[in-house]
Amino acid sequence: MEKPRAALFDLDDTLLDRSSAYEATYGEFYSLHREISDNADLDEEMEFFWSLSPHGTTDAQDAARQLMKRWPQIELEPVEFEAWFFNTLARKAKVIDGALDLLHALNDAQFPWAVVTNGKKFQVTKMQHSGLVDVIPFSIVSRLFGADKPDPRIYNEAVHRLKLSYDGIDDIQPSEILFVGDNPYTDITGAAGVGMKTAWVQVSERYPDDAPKPDMEIESVVELRELLGI
């Protein structure tokens, strides 16, 4: 692959370690509810907690209903649980090892990049708690923008903002931009759909057959240093 002229990054499981934050969040939930912790082992229940996040996404209000179905003695208000869940997840957000050094290097090299993530205002809170907010040139959060990946509008908006944010790339085309993400159905499908190059962060052993194949597969964003020339 030729060196891209710009890069766009997903947030969770791409720049932030969502897995550790997710498990820490449900670990806190487990500790808060003696109805569970007195009768079940956390390691054994973690498989169920992960089942509440299919394809790396979470409908927290539905998760609340599933939790009450599994443990009828627990009473949860879905809207309140959603706020607690995402605020806790945000508090526990940590940058993936080596990713911060990569991002600082991109800034030092004045390489055009940004973050495009699905989610609500809690994504902004994650960037604040993790320290990324002071590093990222700009970010687009889908529910604040008005369209979720893989909707082409959010990718086209990112291209537009890149052109406004960086000198010398006002003629950049989607094919010159690398999109990096972990979700085949939102990140890779959406970016490929507008003509961007794609890099899939391997969060599972096998890429699914029903999504467009990425241009490259990586285990971590730190592997992109050579390609991006930094």
Image (cartoon, grey):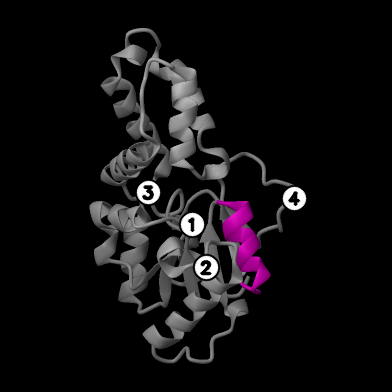
Between 205 and 11, the residue placed more toward the observer is 11
Residue extent of the magenta highlight:
183-196
Decide: marks 4, 3 in contact (CB < 8 A)? no
Dominant SS of magenta comes to helix
Choose the circle earlier in sequence order: 3 or 2.
3
Q: Disc 2 marks which residue? A: 227
Instruction: Give the answer, above or below, for where 102 lies relative to 83.
Output: below
Query: Quadrant of the image for the C terminus?
Result: bottom left
The residue wearing badge 4 is 210
- Quarter of the figure with residue 120: bottom left
Residue that numbered label 3 is attached to = 96
Task: Measure how far apart labels 4 and 2 are at the Cα level.
Answer: 27 Å
For label 1, the residue is 223
The reply to whether callout 4 and callout 2 are in contact (CB within 8 Å) is no
Q: Judge by depth and name the residue closer to the eye, 226 or 185.
A: 185
The question of residue 56 being in magenta is answered with no
The answer to which of marks 1 and 4 sits earlier in the sequence is 4
Amino acid tagged 2:
Leu
Q: Residues within 10 Å of mark 4 (few under 14, many from 20)?
A: few
Taking the view exactly as shown, the residue that stands out farthest to the right is: 209
